[in-house]
Structures are given as C-alpha cells and as structure tokens.
Amino acid sequence: MPSRGTVVMLGLPGSGKTTFLAALWHQLESSEISTAFIAERLQPDREYLNSIRDSWLAFEELRRTTLSAEQSALLHLQHVATKAHFDLSIPDVAGERFAQQWLDRRLPHEYVTQLQQCFGILLFMHCRQIDRVQVLPAREPEPSSQPMVEWDPRYAPTQVRLVDLLQSAQLIFERSRIMRVGVVISAWDEVEERTTPRSWFAKRLPLLNQFLEANADSVDSAIFGVSAIGGSLDDRESLALTPSPSARVRVQIDSDFVRDLTRPLEFLTVEDNFK
Amino acid sequence: METALPESDFVALPSAEPMPARELGLVTAQDETTVVLLAGPVASGKTTILVSLYELFNEGPVGGLLFAGSKTLVGFERICHPNRSVSALQAPATLRTNPSNSTAFLHLRVADTAGERPRMASLLVSDVTGEAFDEARDVANPTILPKEVWRRADILCLVLDADKMSVTTKRQTVRTHARSLLRSARESKLLQPRCKLQIVTTKWDLVVNSQTEDFVAETESLLTEQFRANFESISAHRIAARPTSTRVAYAFGVPTLLTEWVSRPRSKLVVAVPPDQARSGINSFARRFWERERSHLSGVLNAV
C-alpha cells in the first residue's frame, strides 16, 4: 500500500471543496476531537491552509477558489488505528476547471497526472445546487409557439456533468486498482428530511447513482453527508457557542453521525484496494 | 473565461458527441455490444425513442437495467434539449436528425444486476435518417449509410408510424415502404443472416383501441411471414415514446424494446475500418486515451 499520494477533490463551483479543506485542517491541526488520522508533523508551508482555516473560524463565507488562486495542500498524517503514515497532497482546484471539462472537453495536464496516481477521489456536491431535468408535459404544439432556445452545454443537468467527470477520471485512473470515490454531499445541515446520504443521493441523482452501482467492480464508492460549517452562517452567533470549532462539524455516514472529517480520507486511503 | 494556464497545458477529451462508424470498434472490442439501426421514414419517431430512453435513465433504472455510462453524453443532451423546459418550447419536440450525421451512433452502457455479478453490455444505436432509409429502398449500394454499417447491425428496428397508418390514404404507403426496404435489404445483402428484425409501431397512443390496430396487426403478420427466412427472428412492438394522451403511459413499450436489445447474444466483432478513413483532427490526448483503451482490448482494430 503506498504511503504517498494525492486525494483529488472534484466538484463543480460552490460545491464545498475549500470549506471542507479548511475545516479538515482545523480538526487535524488543533486535535480538539478524536480523528481517524492525526497530523503527525506540520508541513513547512501552511500559509494557504491557515488562511482558509481562519476564514472558516471567523464564520466568513469562503470565497470560491478562482482559476488563478489554486493551491495544493500537503498533509503529513498518521492513521491512528493502523499506525500507517501518509503524505497526502490535496489540490484545491477551482470548480471552474471541472465545469470547463464539460463545456470545452479538455483537462489540465497536471490534473491528469494527479488522477493517474491518486488514492481516490472526493466528489463534492452542494445539496441545494443539484440541477434536475424538467421534461415538458407532452401535448400538441401551438401554432404561435415561441422559437426554441438553442442547446448549450451549460443546460446539462448536474448528474450528467458529474457522470462525465467520473467517466473521464475512470479512463485516466490506473487500471490495476479500483477507483475509490467518496461522495461528499455538502451543506448537509440544509437537507430538511430525515434520510441517509445514500437514500438522498439515489433520489436526487439517480443517473449518477446507477453509474456508481453498475460500475462497482471498478469503482468503490461511499456517500457522506457533510456539514463543515455546522449550520447556516446566519446562525453564527449560536454556532460560536459550540464547545470547540471542531465540534461544529457534522458528518453522516449511513445512519451514524460523527464529527470527524478525516473519515472520507480514511475510506480513500486505508485498506488495500489493489486488484 | 480566464484559464490561468496556457493552451499547451491542456489535453483534449473525446467529444462525447455521436460516434462515427469508424470509431465503433472501440466499443465493440471492449464490451459485448449490440448495434441497433433505427430505420424509418422522416418524422416516424425514431429519435424520440432515444430521447425517451435517455430521459427514463435520468430518473432511474429502465427495464431492470442500470445506466453504466455513455461515450456520447453530449449527443444525448442535444437530442433531449427540445424535450425540456429549458428549451423555452411550449410543448416537447424532436429535432430532425441532421442528414450529414447519418452514420453517427449514440452509445449507452448498461448493467444487468440480476445475477451474481453485473453483466455489462453496450448499445450502439444509429438513428438512420429518412434519406438513408429511402436510399436503401432505392439502390443496391447505398452511400448515405454505407453497407459496412448495415452489415454490422445486430438488430434492425423498422419503425412504422401509427399516426400515418391511421390515415386511410397513407397507410398502404407505410406498409409498402417497409416491405420495400426489407426486400431491398435482402437482395442487396445489406444485413447479416444473424440480424434480428423488430417491427416497431410508434405513436401507439394515437391508435390504441381504434380500427388502425387491425391494420397494424395485419402489417406485422405480412412482414413477418414474408421475411421470416431472412432474419434470425422477428418481433413486433408497439410503443408510445412520448404520448400526447393519457391512454398509455409515458414511454410505453420503450423498456421492453431496450431489454430485447440487450438480451440477444452479441458478438465481439470488430468493425472493419477502411484504411483511407484516417482519423483526422483527433488530438494527441484523445489518441492516447484510445490507444490506452486498445491496449486492453482482445480484438484487433484496423489502424487508423
């Protein structure tokens, strides 16, 4: 099992990648709660991580990572249960890159290199930003109907774009290994119904759900409902009263609730997944 | 849009548009594949079958089969656009297939999870234009849809328009054109003996429980009887991919069509690509993708 590699965070703009990374870094660096991984030593350059962490601590809305401001975070971790050591690189890539993949049909070389050797993928989606198809009710057209708006790739529903992202990743990923995909449904606190992440995912993104289920021989997936902020930023006053910032976080895995944001990383990195 | 990266730092992906015939080997050598030709006159409902199928998968499994991927997602999204509210249309419509795209195939990968392990299968479905349909009736060596593509078909889906058959002065033309195509295909040896024929009557919601049902049944019987010896098997289907009435459910008959497409034994034949059909304009990354794909294939592809 390799000890050094990349975790690739995929997701459209605003899907919660940077917020996750900020909260993850805080949990690792502060050791406020028990986590599956610990940061066994600090990396030399922590400026970016500290910067986004500070915004997260202050309940500031984290600005979307822009194409010109992409960074990569390096974490030196130890898995508590197995004592295994990991050096994880987590590029914080702008969501526009992935939006561009669908629109322009191209990928940066650097991303291809990361995918080829990564442990796995965290696929992010914001629970309130799922564009679904609205099929017109069938009826006879009227003579005075307005002209059709021409098709644009931007009209594609979210689940189609995400299938496209994963299909491309599947082609690039090393075939000697099963590709692990941790699906992170962010802003999970905004999901009003009592449900599990897997049930919610199957209902809201049925095409993507089928894709993961059908390709289970080559893609191993797990679904996480994550609230990295812990609630709405409008409620920051009450959120600030939690015993520690780490304790604001909520992660739902099936019917279990934890606070440990390293659990999705654990799914991707631990256990031998070589064929 | 600002990229912050020079052009040379990007690699291109496959277009995800409908696949030309010369690329079919990439699919047929990798997966058990069924090649389906949807053949019928203009506006008979061929494309609407594909629209309906893809929209069904967007909502969940179809006919017990899971969506496992597609190399032509952009192609599907384009044909579905007039079916959706984002098109600003008042009622769903289907764009006429571009005649210049007559040899393009849409790809669907599906999984049958009924057994111990998922069984994967690919479908390559060509929406044969009305012009190609007419030409195949008229000449021994069609060029719009070349013979090599006809001969690769595992299933010929012959589409009959129920709406036209409900008009007394038009119904015999529908039957005659269908019979004429099948005879032409037989004598020109357009299709392989292992090809299966599906006689698919579309827009069934418009004629259900009407006298046209009898004419449709008679047409199905006549065609089956006359061409029984020329196909591995013949089946008849009545569908309403996008009914305008409530007499039948949305996508009536489409799941059954799909399961028959997937259930027939498929060969792993590789589509022979004439050497002069060089793959022009394909960028180096796409080529590396496909070469990497080919390194895992057990078949032999003609060099392109």
Image (tube, grey):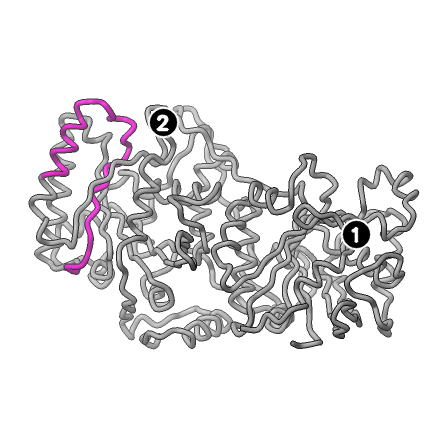
The picture quadrant where one finds residue B165 is top left
The picture quadrant where one finds residue A188 is top right
In the image, which residues are magenta? B192-221
Q: CA distance from mark 2 to mark 1?
A: 51 Å
Labels 2 and 1 within one chain: no
Front-lying residue, A146 or A38: A38
The picture quadrant where one finds residue B239 is top left
At label 2, which amino acid type do we have? Thr
Q: Classify 10 Å Cα crowding around label 2: few (below 14), some (14-19), many (20 and above).
A: some
Q: Chain of mark 1?
A: A
Q: Position of residue B202 (x, y in %)?
A: 27, 36
Q: Position of residue B289 (x, y in %)?
A: 48, 71
Q: Chain of mark 2?
A: B
The answer to whether B81 appears left or right of B95 in the picture is: right
Is residue A235 one of those drawn in magenta? no
Q: Position of residue A180 (x, y in %)?
A: 60, 63
Q: Which quarter shows the N terminus of chain B? A: bottom right
Q: Position of residue A177 (x, y in %)?
A: 55, 71
Front-lying residue, A148 or B192: B192
Residue under circle 1? A259
Residue under circle 2? B244
Label placed on residue A56: none
Front-lying residue, B199 or A12: B199
Count of marks, rendered view: 2
